Amino acid sequence: MSFPAISVIVPTRNRARLLERLLASLREVAYPDWEVIVVDDGSTDDTAAVTARARAAGLPVRYLYQSWAKMGAARNLGQAHARGEILAFTDDDCVVRPGWLQALAAAFERSPQAVGVQGRTVTERAAMTPFTRQIEQLEGGPPYRTCNIAYRADVVRRLGGFDPHLIRGEDVVLGQQALELGPIVFAPEAEVCHPPRAKEWANRHAWRTLLDSELHFRRSYPQYAGARSPTLSVQRADHVLSRWLLLPLRRYWRWHWAYLRRHPWRYARHIPLIIGEKLALFSLLPYFLSRWRETRH
């Protein structure tokens, strides 16, 4: 088996504790020629110190810093400094398995025509609640999330990297663009765990940033809309209501009800947060609808 040089690129922002867990798992990785590039997207916590401790413990890690510019821009900065012929991407809230890089390299060797390799992403189901965020992808195919995927470096650079204007969906766009150059194969043995983490509640600023991103996606990549997660994107104006307000209730009400019955006081503490998040979204609907009409001209 050949061992191409692999650069692991990890964007992060103000998640030093989670990043420390990821870097600890990366220290268990056995691979002959690799590096880790942590790109700090404007953190104000001790992300730099966490990375320095990991380097002192023997992890081949480099630290790059940029002012906040979204995750796509952070990944672009990482790939611009990467020396690997393979670029492997994971997130700061993930945990990789020791054989992760070997499995990715083996998949590229088995499929020399492949432009990318998508790994298997699991979660810890026992820790899931209605108020956690986690990812589980047990089969190959879209969406091609950057929590567990690798591309040939020349392919990423040929495509111009990730769209830095998207706050969500930039990995979907790159994956779909890469598919136009060749196949992305699935390697279930390349496993990453994406454990549940507490939901980050959106305020008005966060919603506006996300809505602007959705408008940019619609304007720039309408052909890729179907490849996105149906519960996390907006493809029509009415999806703000149907997908971000009504669908979560229709799809998850049993889960909420079960959690409420088991932990009524815990659930009650989340009610003001739920209401506040939805009111913040409602307050931006006039702005969103006026901008949405502009994308049709």
Image (cartoon, helix red, strand yellow):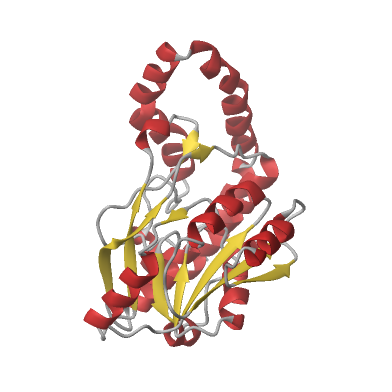
Q: Which residue occupies the foreground of this view, 49 or 185?
A: 49
Q: Is residue 164 visible?
A: no
In the drawing, does residue 82 fall left or right of residue 239? Answer: right
Residue 85: x and y in percent read 45, 85
Q: Residue at x 44, y 29 (%)?
A: 129
Residue at 60% over, 82% down: 80
Instruction: Classify 122 as above or below 159.
Output: above
Looking at the image, is 175 positioned above or below residue 124?
Answer: below
Horizontal placement of 240 versus 112: left or right? right
- Quadrant of the snapshot with the N terminus: bottom left
Residue that protrudes farthest toward the left in the picture:
110
Residue 21, given in percent of the width and then of the height, sits at 55, 50
In the rendered image, residue 86, in percent from the top left (x then y), is placed at: 43, 80
As rendered, which of 271 and 289 lies closer to the eye? Answer: 271
Extreme residue in the front direction: 57
- The percent coordinates of residue 283 (x first, y second) are 65, 36
What residue do we see at 27% from left, 52% from top?
A: 138
Q: Quadrant of residue 175?
A: bottom left
Residue 126, above or below 12: above
Residue shown at the point (53%, 50%) measured from the top left: 93
276 or 140, nearer to the observer: 140
Q: On the picture, is 102 further left or further right than 198?
A: left
Q: Nearer the viewer, residue 84 or 208?
A: 84
Task: Please state the total of marks drawn on the protein image.
Answer: 0
Q: Is residue 189 visible from the viewing direction of this image? A: yes
